[in-house]
Image: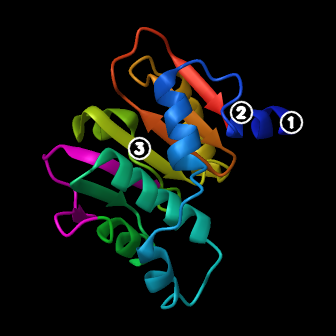
């Protein structure tokens, strides 16, 4: 399984153009962004930098303007998300509005159910679950993988990315 993850991380065996571009240009991007060094200088804890950088790259790539964070412990990831554009609106308050990206942190407070998240999403919304190895995160991840409305998923060991966009096939990638 470990070898397969490394192989897929380079885009090998990925036939979907969307998935290939996402893996090679966003998830495993070779590029540094100006915001990384500026924000990282202010961080007291540098343990989750890979997650914060991935958050930035995903929001930047998909040009998400309306972002919802659920159960965020601090505002560090918010800083990375908001650094992608001055037009970003990032909130952690539940509303009836539709969001382009939803970040879900599987802390001890639990995770919203899939139906609630779908009501806050549109076809192009993507969800990021951190961490899919925690008790609540693992339960949510397994439910999402089985749900027919979830079309494309990426398992990045600790982080799960879910896409809702219409697709004739359900695709699950372990990267």
Question: Disc 1 and disc 3: Cα gap in Å?
Answer: 26 Å
Q: Nearer the viewer, residue 82 or 102?
A: 82
Which residue corresponds to the image point at 71% horizontal and 33% vertical from the top-left? 8
SS at badge 3? strand
State the mark number for residue 152.
none
Residue 105, above or below 123: below
Question: Disc 1 and disc 2: Cα gap in Å?
Answer: 9 Å
Crowding at label 3, few (<14), some or many (≥20) Cα neighbours within 10 Å?
many
Residue 160 figure quarter: top right
Q: Position of residue 62 (x, y in %)?
A: 33, 45
SS at badge 1? helix
For marks 1 and 2 on the same chain, the one whose residue lies earlier in the sequence: 1
Q: Quadrant of the N terminus?
A: top right
Residue 39, above or below 89: below
Q: Position of residue 34 (x, y in %)?
A: 43, 75
Which residue is most to the front? 31
Residue bearing the label numbered 3 = 127
Which residue is most to the left? 96
Question: Disc 2 and disc 3: Cα gap in Å?
Answer: 21 Å
Q: Position of residue 38 (x, y in %)?
A: 44, 85
Q: Position of residue 87 (x, y in %)?
A: 16, 64
Query: Which residue range is magenta in the image?
Result: 85-104
For marks 1 and 3 on the same chain, the one whose residue lies earlier in the sequence: 1
Q: Nearer the viewer, residue 58 or 162?
A: 58
**Which colour assignment does the render follow?**
rainbow
State the mark number for residue 3.
1
Q: Nearer the viewer, residue 18 or 51?
A: 18
For marks 2 and 3 on the same chain, the one whose residue lies earlier in the sequence: 2
Circles 1 and 2, Cβ within 8 Å, touching? The answer is: no
Q: Is residue 1 left or right of residue 22?
A: right
Residue bearing the label numbered 2 = 8
């Amino acid at each position: 399984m470990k070898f397969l993850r490394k192989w897929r991380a380079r885009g090998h065996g990925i036939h979907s153009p969307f998935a290939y571009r996402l893996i090679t240009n966003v998830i495993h991007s070779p590029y540094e962004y100006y915001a990384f060094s500026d924000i990282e200088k202010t961080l007291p804890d540098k343990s989750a930098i890979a997650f914060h950088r991935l958050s930035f790259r995903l929001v930047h790539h998909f040009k998400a303007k309306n972002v919802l964070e659920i159960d965020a412990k601090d505002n560090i990831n918010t800083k990375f998300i908001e650094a992608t554009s001055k037009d970003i609106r990032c909130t952690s308050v539940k509303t009836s509005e539709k969001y382009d990206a939803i970040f879900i942190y599987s802390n001890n407070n639990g995770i919203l159910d899939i139906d609630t998240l779908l009501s806050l999403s549109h076809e192009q919304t993507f969800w990021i679950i951190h961490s899919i190895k925690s008790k609540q995160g693992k339960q949510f991840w397994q439910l999402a993988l089985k749900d027919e409305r979830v079309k494309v998923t990426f398992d990045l060991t600790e982080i799960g990315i879910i896409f809702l966009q219409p697709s004739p096939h359900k695709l699950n990638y372990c990267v």
